Amino acid sequence: MIKFNKKHFNVFFVTFLLLNFILKVTLSQNLAQTKSRVQILSSEEFHGRGYVFEGADKSAEYISNELRNIGVKAFKESYFQVFGYSVNTFPDDGYVKLNRQKLLPGKDYLFGHSSPKISKKYEIFLPDSILLNDTIKFEEMLRESEFKNYALIIDYLKTKNLDIKKYYIRKMMYNKDFGCIVELIPDELMWSVSRFVQTYPVIKIQRGSFDFKSKRLKIKINSKYFPVFAAKNVIGYIPGETDRFIVFTAHYDHLGRMGKSVYFPGAQDNASGVAMLLDLADYYSKNPPKHSIAFIFFFGEEAGLLGSRFYTQYPFFPLEKIDFLINLDLVGTGDEGITVVNGAEEEYEEYMRILNEINNELDLLPQINKRGKSVNSDHAPFNDKGVKGIFIYSMGGKTYYHSPKDKPETLTFAGYESLFKLLTEFVLRIENK
């Protein structure tokens, strides 16, 4: 048995404190760099990483430069995989006026993402609660009268019936009766991306900003449709000892801009995932892996998983060589732990056991929640091709989805260091299975 005297103990204790300090500094430096990257990607300079003012190209260039600086290799001459799809964009400002009162874009209203280029006045048609809840009578009214010069105001708070709410959602999506549809949104305004253009405009107005005494609506929408928008996936890898691959993925696109005055920063969705992938790339460049590690940054996720679907059709290396895929989307919080999509599936039971074992051993995250199969992010096209993979997102904190409020300052990064450690340890263990 080795006996420790006071001198030995002091040396041991000082060494322990020093190593602990170095570890914390290293982790905090990674986190500081991650926060900086999220700040940059979410800045107005990148225009919401979308479809106007070269937001997509600037984002792709930034990510590829970071990969180059880290030392990540490209599979081909560049890091880019180019593809294209149709999209409706909003490069110029418009306006919404109730009577003569101009509403504030991004705060009071958002244009529907499928809205056409239009400038027009409408009379307001605001059904009372009785008419709104009587869809048979509502349909009879539509057959008897002409409403092409009217804007239908849909106030969802006037009904508690889910089927009636679905009726008006369908009316909004497949309208043939009204010149314009206005949805009154009681919660946060949310936007999206559309690959087509409707024949009529849709306006989403914050319910608290709507004057129920208004008689007229005047709008101007400057949308522009692109039959083919050139997009890029950004792809690189760090070679390992084998030709097998662990793949990390995240989408870097977001919603872009609605004119010059409103942009969608997309800090949580998904600058957070992009920043973590870059941090992982930096880690594996300094800690050579057993299997090769590929990093794929997709564009077009918000438009329907288009980048990941394209990649699985035209992969840079055989999909059969992928041992496991980890997709990161919405990972800027973690106060309440993480959720693992596919984690509840029987074929992923062993992987979940390893994740929980690591989490318990190292006392990392408050909880690891598991969900079943889902097609809500870029793991899904790979799963469809037979590639095993999970999608991880963080829980907790106050974040904003598809909103101009999705800014870096809303992210807590409470689980960042723990998730990072969980992932690197998980890769190490599945590599050595």
Image (tube, grey):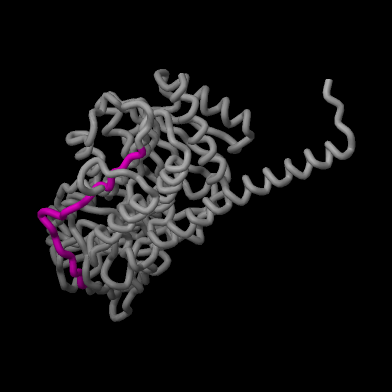
Left or right of residue 57: residue 280:
right
The residue drawn where x is 25% and y is 53% is: 193
Q: Nearer the viewer, residue 381 or 28?
A: 28
Left or right of residue 182: residue 357:
right
Rendered image quadrant of residue 318: top left
Is most of the magenta stretch helix, strand or loop? Answer: strand
Q: Nearer the viewer, residue 199 or 7?
A: 7
Rendered image quadrant of residue 238: top left
Q: Position of residue 161 (x, y in %)?
A: 37, 44
Q: Quadrant of the N terminus?
A: top right
Residue 226 drawn in magenta: yes
The residue drawn where x is 27% and y is 44% is: 74
Q: Position of residue 66 (x, y in %)?
A: 36, 54
Location of residue 45 with respect to 311 vertically, above or below: below
Q: Which residues are magenta?
A: 220-238
The residue drawn where x is 13% and y is 53% is: 143
